[in-house]
Image (cartoon, rainbow, N blue to C red):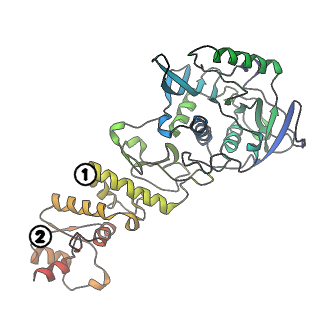
Amino acid sequence: MSESDEYDDYSSDIDYETEDENSDFKKRKTVPLAFTKSYAPDWTEKDAFREFYQNWRDGIIESFNLRPDLVRPVFARNDHHEIHITASLVAESTAGTSTPRLFGYIIFKSQPGSLEITNFEAKLERRHLHLGETNKRDDPRSAGGHGEGFKVGALVLRRSGYSVKFETNSLYWNFGFARDRALLCCALTKPQQSVLIKQAEKCRKQKGTPNQTRGLVARIREDMTVKIGKSTDDKHGVRPKKRGISEETFRAWLTVSLDLDPPNAAQVIHTPAGDLIGDPRYRGRVYLKGLLVSEYGDHKSGGKNYRFGYNFNSGKVNRDRQSVVDLNEEARMLANIWESAIAMKGVAIIDSYVNLFNQDGEVPDIAMALDHVSRLTAVNICKYLKMFHPEAFFYSDRQESEQNPTTDEDIISQELKKKPFKLAKKLWQIIRKYEDQQGRQLMLTPLQERKRLF
């Protein structure tokens, strides 16, 4: 928790004005932002929390120069009263003992319905209030990069009736709507000098004590803290959350991250391109670097009813955080995930993949598959079909150039003496696209096979 809590109140609200144009200030400055209350109407509270969580995680990675896979949040406490989530790394001390180094924490308290998200050794600067300002645009380890996430997150939570306050770089940032119109503003205020002196003294003593580790306490001078909680501000039709965040609400927010809400490990296949998630609870969900982008059934899915869940290891989301930017790239990653999963798991997963082609209408799991499914995948599917259906001869709808008075079914059953097995047209086209090592097509049409034999 913040050491400045004795001077702070989650429920405090400020009357915002927009006339302040001073470049500097002695105690308080109000900065109008480029967002009205109606901006990002499709965003939910979960979306807003996702942005704050992403910034928390990315901030830890950047501040401590860590690989993303080393940032694994742990539930240090998880009950109906409080939920503590920490991020740390175990390091060997000079004495040979293992001491966890804490990088940040998240604390939820059901009473008074408050949430605190703190990054150690991270800061926001006033320039980050400007549109598009970000440190993450060219960092491949992050999932965002537009520079708007924390501002839109603050807007959405204020619109939902919560208070939103930051403590960073020796300033309080209090978000709210202007008095005269529904424009998001940020009131910057300076803490009392006694607060800064008290924190500096505690920090000096702690650093002077050997093997002393930081606790769940933020320092406004050197850390970045987000506080979300109850509010009484009802300007511009906002219905204030006078009781803050409920436990049920916060636990729902946690589902935006695979780190915080992991699926059954036995039902996840990890591949170089990303994760294939077979856990039924995650069907229809698409994640990017562990953060939820969309899920079927919500208004943002665009009607995409994925039959599995996916977590992409690379890519960027659009400005609205509602989809991966490049649909062609998304289709390529899907094909790569399935290729690796089939190579790793074999028969069990091939059967699931083949069934995707038999669904009514094209499912997004196999979007643009004809363009992106590899020869290796086609070969493995072909082997699987021939292995489990040895008496079958496979076919699909004929091309116009292959029209013949005799049907494929008749050729297969009467002349080839096999059982007709019709494949979905798209799957057939994928298999027919490739050749074996001898330069022969992986599968022949019934007409081609008849000509070859007779």
* Lower sequence index among marks 2 and 1: 1
Give the Cα separation between the discs numbered 2 and 1: 26 Å
Estimate the x, y position of residue 41 in percent, counting from the top left: 66, 49
- Confirm or deny contact between disc 2 and disc 1 (CB under 8 A): no
Label 1's element? loop
The residue under label 2 is: 418
The answer, for residue 75, to whether it is visible in the render is yes
Which residue occupies 48% across, 33% down?
72
Which residue occupies 47% across, 35% down?
261
Which residue occupies 50% across, 34% down?
71
Label 2's element? loop
Estimate the x, y position of residue 175 in percent, counting from the top left: 76, 36
Which residue occupies 88% across, 35% down?
25
Q: Is residue 58 left or right of residue 242?
A: left
Identify which residue, 42 or 448, lies in the foreground.
Answer: 448
Q: Amino acid at mark 1?
A: Gly
Q: Is residue 21 left or right of residue 329?
A: right
Estimate the x, y position of residue 78 in percent, counting from the top left: 50, 22
Identify which residue, 254 or 193, lies in the foreground.
Answer: 193
Q: Amino acid at mark 2?
A: Lys
Estimate the x, y position of residue 104 in percent, counting from the top left: 59, 28
Report which quarter residue 116 is drawn in.
top right
Q: Mark 2: few, some, or many residues within 10 Å (few <14, many ≥20)?
A: some
Q: Quadrant of the N terminus?
A: top right
Q: Which mark is residue 346?
A: 1
